[in-house]
Image (cartoon, rainbow, N blue to C red):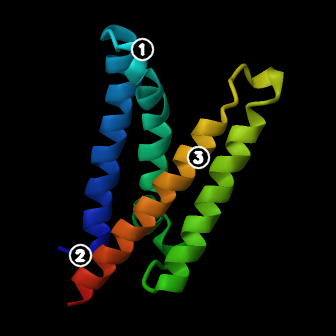
Amino acid sequence: MNLRTVSRWVVIAGTLLIWTVKFVIRPYIHIPAAWKPVFGMAPNLIGSFLLPFGACWLFEKIFGMKTYRELRIASWFGLILVVINEYLQLVPFFGRTFDYLDILSSFFGVFLGYLSYSWLMVRMEL
């Protein structure tokens, strides 16, 4: 199995997990107060984790994703877009809420995604 195929399945599974948290767990299952921040940040964390995998699967012609340099560029580009999206939520027109914890979880998610994807790059080369 090549890296693009693995990336496709990781993105599909991660997207289904995000949808489960946003549309099933948070609205219909009682979450104790101590766990609410975790489930609030989970979609950002998972979505940011998926950025390198999504770049490999969907934007392979733009980013390449064959070297560590291309992986870093794609990860930084995705992180910048996520942070811009979060700051756009300060504009009242969009009707969204801004949260620094979302930015923090996005940084952590991109970092974990970068580490995981780079580990897979090494494993797939061997």
Q: Give percent across and percent down for residue 109.
A: 47, 53
For residue 109, which numbered disc appears in the image?
Answer: none
Which secondary structure lies at badge 2? loop
Quadrant of the frame with the N terminus: bottom left
- The alpha-carbon separation of the residues under discs 1 and 3 comes to 20 Å
Q: Is residue 3 left or right of residue 64?
A: left
Which marked residue is nearer to the observer: mark 2 or mark 1? 1
**In the structure shown, which secondary structural element does the residue marked by tag 3 occupy?**
helix
Corner quadrant of residue 91: top right
Q: Residues within 10 Å of mark 3 (few under 14, many from 20)?
A: some
Between disc 2 and disc 1, whose residue precedes? 2
At x 75%, y 40%, the residue is 87
Measure the C-alpha gap from mark 2 to mark 1: 42 Å
Q: Quadrant of the C terminus?
A: bottom left
Q: Is residue 58 visible?
A: no
Give the quarter of the image for residue 89: top right
Q: Given the current orientation, which residue lies at the most extreme left position?
A: 1
Above or below: residue 46 compared with residue 33: below
Q: Which residue is mark 3?
A: 104
In this view, the residue in front, 51 or 57, is 51
Q: Earlier in the sequence, mark 2 or mark 3?
A: 2
**CA separation, marks 2 and 3?**
31 Å
Residue 33: which numbered mark, if any?
1
The type of residue carrying mark 3 is Leu
Read off the residue under disc 2.
2
Residue 117 visible in rendering: yes
Q: Amino acid at mark 1?
A: Ala
